[in-house]
Image (cartoon, helix red, strand yellow):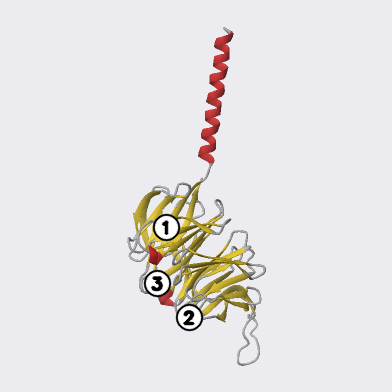
Amino acid sequence: MNILYNNSKCTAFIIFLFAIANCLAQSKPERILLATSKTDHTLSLVDASTLKIIKKLPVGPNPHEVVVSADGTTAYVSNPGNSDLHEINVIDVQNQKTLPNIDTAPFLGPHGMVLQNNKLWFTAQGSKSVARYDTQTHKFDLAIGTGQDVTHLLHVTPNGKKFYTTNVESGTVSIFENMLVEPTIPPTGVLPPTAKPHLDWTHTLITAGQGVEGFDVLPNEKELWAVDPKGNIYIIDTEAKQITLTIKTGILGLHRIAFTPDGKTAATVSVRTGDLLFFDVKSRKEIKRIQTGQGAAMLMDAVDNRLFISCSPNDYIAIIDLKSMEVSGKLEVGGRPDGLEFAVTE
C-alpha cells in the first residue's frame, strides 16, 4: 500500500514538473529576426536562436526597411523605388501571412520608418517630407516638409516630440522639435489680443557632408552620430543642435552606424570596402577594425550580444560577436538583403 502511495506521489510530482516546464516554455518570449531581400522581393522570418528560416513572405517591388509593432505581431516594409513608389507592405508575423498594403500616396518614396504608439512615421524621399500614419484609424495624421533632397533615414524620440532625418543629396541633418512658439509680430508692430504662444514644429538644419546617410542616436538621446561616403563621422549635440566633432576615418563608403545597447561603443560599416570600425563613444577613439562585407543595414542584438549587418552587394548577412568584435557567422536570406528587425512575441 505504501509502495502504491509513494508511486502516486512520484507520478504527481513528475506531472507537476512537466507543467512548470511547459508554463516556462510558453512564457518565454519568441524572437524572430525579420530580413528583407531586394532581389527576391521577400521578407524572411528567421528563428533568432537557431538562425533557421521559418518562412519567406512576398513583399513589394523594392523592399528596404522593416519595423515591427511593440507586441511583435505586425511588421511593415517600405518600398521607396526611385523615390516614386508609394507602398508599405503589412505583414501578420504571428500567422505568417501578408495583409493589405498601405498606399502612402501622395507621399512618395517611403523609406526610413519608426513605429511608436500605433503611429507609423516614415520618410517620403520623393516628397521631401516626413509623414505619419495611424495604424488604428488608417489615416495620415501628420505631414512635415523638410525641403531637402532624399530625406532618407529617421529617428523619433520616445516622447514623439522630436525627430531627426538625414537628407542624402542635400548633405544635411534635420532636427525637428515640437515646442511652444511665440506669436509672430505683424507688420503693424502690435500683437492682436487673440495672439498667444502655440505648439509648432521647428526645423534646424545642420550641414554635414554630401551623401550623409547612416546615423544613430545614443540611448540617452544626447548625441547623434552620422556618417558620409568620404569616411567622416559627424558627432552632433542634440541639445545645442550643432556638430561638436568630425572624425575622419579615411574609409570611403561609410554607410551605416549603430550604437551598442549600452551606448558605450559605436560600429560603422563601409558599403564600399567592407571595413567595420568600432569606436569608444567616450574617448572618440577607434578600438578595432575588421573586414565583414560591404555593409548596409545594421541591427544590434542585446539578448545574444550580436550585431547583424546586411551586406547587400555580397548577398549575405554578417553576424558579429560583440564581445570579440569578430565575424561569428553568415546568414543567407536571398539576394541583396537590407532591412533588419526583431519581432518579439509572448
The three-letter code of the residue at mark 2 reads Gln
Query: Mark 1 and mark 3: span between their CA atoms?
Result: 20 Å
Name the mark nearer the viewer: 1 or 3.
1
Residue 148: assigned label = 2
Identify which residue is drawn at 60% across, 92% down: 187
Return the residue nearer the eye: 339 or 103: 339
Tell me where residue 39 sits by quadrant. Answer: bottom left
Mark 2 secondary-structure assignment = loop
Identify which residue is drawn at 50% across, 79% down: 230
Residue 308: assigned label = none
Residue 35: assigned label = 1
Residue 109: assigned label = 3
Mark 1 secondary-structure assignment = strand
Q: Is residue 252 above or below residue 141?
A: below
Closer to the N terminus: mark 1 or mark 2? 1
Identify which residue is drawn at 51% across, 38% down: 25
Name the mark nearer the viewer: 1 or 2.
1
Residue 296 location, x and y as percent? 45, 66
Query: Mark 3 and mark 2: span between their CA atoms?
Result: 14 Å
Label 3 neighbourhood size at 10 Å, few (<14), some (14-19), many (20+)? many
